[in-house]
């Protein structure tokens, strides 16, 4: 049994099924090296967790590092695991893996990144809206396709079997133009962060929560679209600016809407925190 305050985790993700809370994330002491070991945890109270085991054991990710930000989604009876990964010869991107079981035996859906090849992408998430499936992801600030340091978020429709993007991805958030992100980096590479997207519906609108590096550290921003998933996302407010981020939302067993994030954004000190919405 592991207490929440003792669990080192970045990018926490909570999946609720059958009255239990399943937790995954970048759970490792080496997030900038190998990255997540893709261990799944289970809890009855969100305070005490038990390891269920590793979700991927077939070696398909053994040649990759920086395995980050895993997410778990259920769609049409199957469970889909999305992870970011890096390999020098193919840069960074996001894989989709699939299983009939929530807890284990996840296999590569295609073996290729679902994000555009050569873009340098991370933090992909799934969103269902209007009976269509969408993929939202970050084009990393270190390898922006605009070559101007603009870390940004894109969204695109997915086909029904989740094997490829339909049409051209649309940029919906620019870190550089957000007015919130500050420039980070060194002499060789500088840029503005926009990452960790999470989408949900609220009062007929689509809410996009995303993370950046602002003046006070890691920061969560709320942007809203009034015209659909592929619409125009406008800044609404800062949700959290106390050096915590990469959030997602879930509904607990009491029907309360919770936001979870990691804080602080400092290696080895990151812990899962909760905010009621």
Image: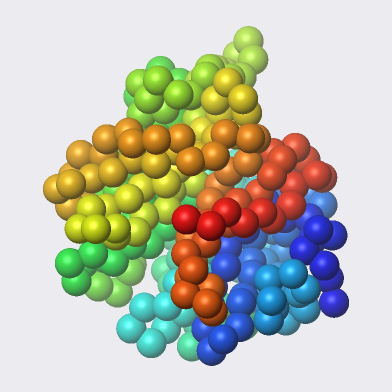
Q: Quadrant of residue 241?
A: top right
Task: Name the residue: 40% across, 20% down.
Answer: 179
* Residue positioned 14% across, 48% down in the render: 227
Judge whether residue 239 can be spotted in this image: yes
Q: Tell me if 209 is positioned left or right of 31 in this view.
A: left
Which residue sits furthest left?
A: 227
> How many numbered marks appear?
0
| Residue 148 x, y percent position in the rendering | 40, 18
Q: Position of residue 64 (x, y in %)?
A: 64, 54
Q: Quadrant of residue 118?
A: top left
Query: Which residue is at 20% across, 58% downward?
Result: 204
Q: Position of residue 21 (x, y in %)?
A: 61, 77
Position of the N terminus, as image quadrant, is bottom right
Q: Residue furthest top?
A: 187
Q: Nearer the viewer, residue 151 or 41?
A: 41
Query: Is residue 192 something that shows in the picture?
Result: no
Q: What residue lies at 48% left-to-right and 60% top-to-bottom?
A: 249
Colour treatment of the image? rainbow
| Foreground residue among 29 and 2 | 2
Q: Taking 113 as reference, is 245 above or below it?
A: above
The image shows residue 114 at horizontal and vertical percentages of 39, 57
Would you place residue 94 above or below residue 173 in this image? below
């Amino acid at each position: 049994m592991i207490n929440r305050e003792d669990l080192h985790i970045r990018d926490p993700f909570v999946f609720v099924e059958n009255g239990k809370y399943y937790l995954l994330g970048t759970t490792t002491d080496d997030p900038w090296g190998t990255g997540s070991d893709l261990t799944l945890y289970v809890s009855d109270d969100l305070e005490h967790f038990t390891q269920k085991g590793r979700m991927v054991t077939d070696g398909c990710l053994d040649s990759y590092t920086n395995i980050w930000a895993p997410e778990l989604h259920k769609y049409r009876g199957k469970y889909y695991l999305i992870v970011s990964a890096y390999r020098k010869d193919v840069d960074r991107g996001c894989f989709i893996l699939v299983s009939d079981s929530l807890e284990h035996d996840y296999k590569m859906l295609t073996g290729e990144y679902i994000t555009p090849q050569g873009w340098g992408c991370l933090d992909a998430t799934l969103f269902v809206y209007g009976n269509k499936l969408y993929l939202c992801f970050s084009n990393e600030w270190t390898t922006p396709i605009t070559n101007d340091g603009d870390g940004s978020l894109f969204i695109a429709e997915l086909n029904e079997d989740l094997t490829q993007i339909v049409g051209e991805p649309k940029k919906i958030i620019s870190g550089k133009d957000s007015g919130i992100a500050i420039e980070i980096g060194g002499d060789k590479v500088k840029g503005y962060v926009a990452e960790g997207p999470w989408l949900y519906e609220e009062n007929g609108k689509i809410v996009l929560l995303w993370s950046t590096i602002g003046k006070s550290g890691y920061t969560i921003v709320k942007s809203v679209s009034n015209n659909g998933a592929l619409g125009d996302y406008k800044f609404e407010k800062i949700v959290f600016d106390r050096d915590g981020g990469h959030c997602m939302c879930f509904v607990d067993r009491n029907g309360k809407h919770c936001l979870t994030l990691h804080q602080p954004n400092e290696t080895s000190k990151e812990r899962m925190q909760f905010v009621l919405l």
